[in-house]
Image (tube, rainbow, N blue to C red):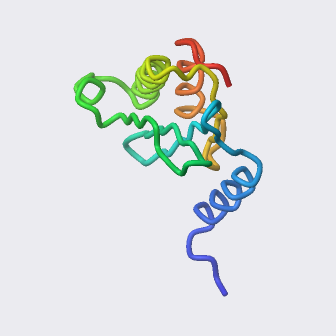
Amino acid sequence: MAIKNFKEYRRLRIKHRIRKIVKGTAERPRMSVFRSNTNIYVQLIDDEAKKTIIAVSSMEQEIASVKATKVEKSKLVGKTFAQKAIEAGITAVVFDRGGYLYHGRVKSLADSAREAGLKF
């Protein structure tokens, strides 16, 4: 059987390997990242209650209206996400990179969230 898209298959294998280890709780939710070709999305998930607490993406009005590169928009998403999480009373999270390499947009999002006050 031929694998249709090896890159996607590889990412999903890595994602499942990470998800076996990383679990989000009410005190320390999981910060899940999804990266598409044009946008980046991040969610705060409580795996025990199976609920999404906070979700931010680069498609939101104040971020999408800014003329910037994808890496710069990822920084804005990370900063906005951290501000919303701190307002909700969450300061510590578990980072789930979703099978993506910790590089580029994913790294800039994580670094800006850390600078804004989240602890990983």
Which of 80 and 69 lies nearest the eye of the viewer? 80
Q: Quadrant of residue 92?
A: top right
Residue 35 x %, y %:
48, 45
Q: Residue at x 64, y 39 (%)?
A: 25
Which of 113 and 84 lies nearest the eye of the viewer? 84
Q: Is residue 63 left or right of residue 85?
A: left
User: Is 100 located above or below residue 83 in the figure?
Assistant: below
Residue 23 x %, y %:
69, 45
Which of 71 and 114 lies nearest the eye of the viewer? 114
Quarter holding the C terminus? top right
User: Is 119 located above or below residue 12 in the figure?
Assistant: above
User: Is 36 located above or below residue 7 in the figure?
Assistant: above
User: Is 82 located above or below residue 24 in the figure?
Assistant: above
Quarter holding the N terminus? bottom right
Q: Is residue 42 left or right of residue 47?
A: left
Q: Residue at x 43, y 40 (%)?
A: 41
Q: Residue at x 28, y 33 (%)?
A: 60
Residue 42 x %, y %:
47, 38
Residue 63 x %, y %:
30, 26
Q: Residue at x 50, y 46 (%)?
A: 34
Figure disc tally: 0
